[in-house]
Amino acid sequence: MSEQAKARRFEQMALAHLDAAHNLARWLTRNDHDAEDVVQEAYLRAFKYFDGYQGGNGKAWILAIVRRTCFTWLGRNRPKEVLTVEADVLEAAAERAAANAASGPEGPEAEIIRRADKRAIDAAIAALPAPYREVLVLRELEDMAYKEIATVTGIPIGTVMSRLARARALLREALGGALDRKPAHGM
Amino acid sequence: MECNAVRGMLDRYVDGELDAGQAVALEAHVRGCGECRALLEQRKSLSEAIRERAAYHPAPDGLAARIRARAGMNLTEARATTERAPAARAPLALRTWQPLAMAASLLLAVAVSSGTTYLAMRPAAEPGTVDEVVADHIRSLQAKHLTDVASTDQHTVKPWFDGRIDLAPTVKDLSAKGFPLIGGRLDYLGGAEAAALVYGHSQHVINVFVTKGGANAAPSLTDRKGYNVLHWVDGGMSYWAVSDVTIDVLEKLQRLIAAPD
């Protein structure tokens, strides 16, 4: 592949998805500066090994690299954050989600969620453990199918589905709770 | 359908990942069940709230240029042909909640976000292998995602692909010939989008994947894991028909699809 052809293909396969890449990195690092660093590092790495790339779904390919770079970066710079993402947090969240699901027409009404303001929504997503946050962002903000999310994250489709369900249960809890608190404490 | 089954499928419904049959059954149940309807509304409202109001963080100005510079990309020509259109994100919040619309908006988002590069992303080589065709076929049956557009009417299915995929697959009403049309679906072969047309034949399902093809090629048959796969290229389109029907049935469908109208 000539240098020019390589550059042209890289534009199409990778740089065309720079907004999605940055959005994912920003949601995972939760910081503008770090997101930009991570995206740059990921793209330079992708370009370096681009000769061996066979083609296919460019968006899923580059997001997989960005996502991997994010987690490596988090592990190096904020090991605590990656640690809190470990089993106990996931377990507790899963149990809460399961308890919610079992208790019938539970959780906040659609109307309460519908009125949630932007700041509350952003804060609730930012508070999710990273493995939940990433599937939620890929699903709701990048509108990716389960199959594509599985490709990006390298986890099976069944796990994509269960993490998504748990992410949403946590968000319903957070957004409903923000509005329900008043009467609960006023008594 | 039982409430429990419905509740287990709400997310997949909202995400457009149910097949048409399940989606229809779920909708029928929800019409008659207030509790499940409230849960569905709750699911939808969360998804809508996120899509409408959660922060989206596009790349800052200059990031693309910095990456090009650091990569030492020879970019005069490349950039001229594929510069990203600014603010080209699809308005996701405009969606409705039918699986069909979900799939549509997915493709819209892909098409819009990659702008002019959409067409160029297609690999030039023949996408797809027999293994992948069989895997996609099995998945379409197992994952309950057989169709994005469920219709026996070719005049519904064919236009459905317009604007969602950069080819116009041949869609025929072959029900009189023993192959009722079940619907259509977007799928992937070799990482590129493919139109999947779904035909029935007695109790069997036949997937016909269509992608851009090269020179005409006569049908060639392979079998894999108990499935027959027939591949041919006709009129610039590459076809992969896959099913557990017998070879002669598959060949008959091939002749019907390839026959001039």
Image: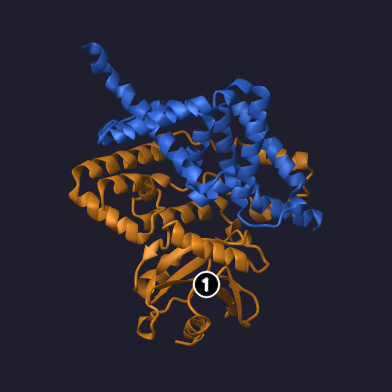
Chain colours: A blue, B orange
Please give left or right for residue B227 compared with residue A65 in the image: left
Q: Regarding mark 1 in the picture, which secondary structure is present there?
A: strand
Given the current orientation, which residue lies at the most extreme front position? B226
Please give left or right for residue A20 compared with residue A102 in the image: right
- Residue at position x 49%, y 49% from top? A146
Decide: is B260 above or below B16.
Answer: below
Given the current orientation, which residue lies at the most extreme bottom position? B260
Decide: is A134 above or below A87.
Answer: below
Q: Which residue is mark 1?
A: B242
- Residue at position x 77%, y 38% from top? B70
Q: Where does the C terminus of chain A fall, quadrant-wise?
A: top left
Viewer-side residue, B12 vs B111: B12
- Residue at position x 38%, y 55% from top? B18
Q: Chain of mark 1?
A: B
Q: Residues within 10 Å of mark 1 (few under 14, many from 20)?
A: many
Q: Is residue A142 visible?
A: no
* Percent x, y of residue A84: 55, 23
Q: Where does the N terminus of chain A fall, quadrant-wise?
A: bottom right
- Residue at position x 25%, y 36% from top? A105
Count of all numbered marks drawn on residues in the image: 1
* Percent x, y of residue B26: 29, 53
* Percent x, y of residue B4: 29, 45
Decide: is B217 above or below A112.
Answer: below
Q: Quadrant of residue B120?
A: bottom right
Please give left or right for residue B257 compared with residue B118 in the image: left
* Percent x, y of residue B130: 61, 69
Q: Is residue A119 visible?
A: yes
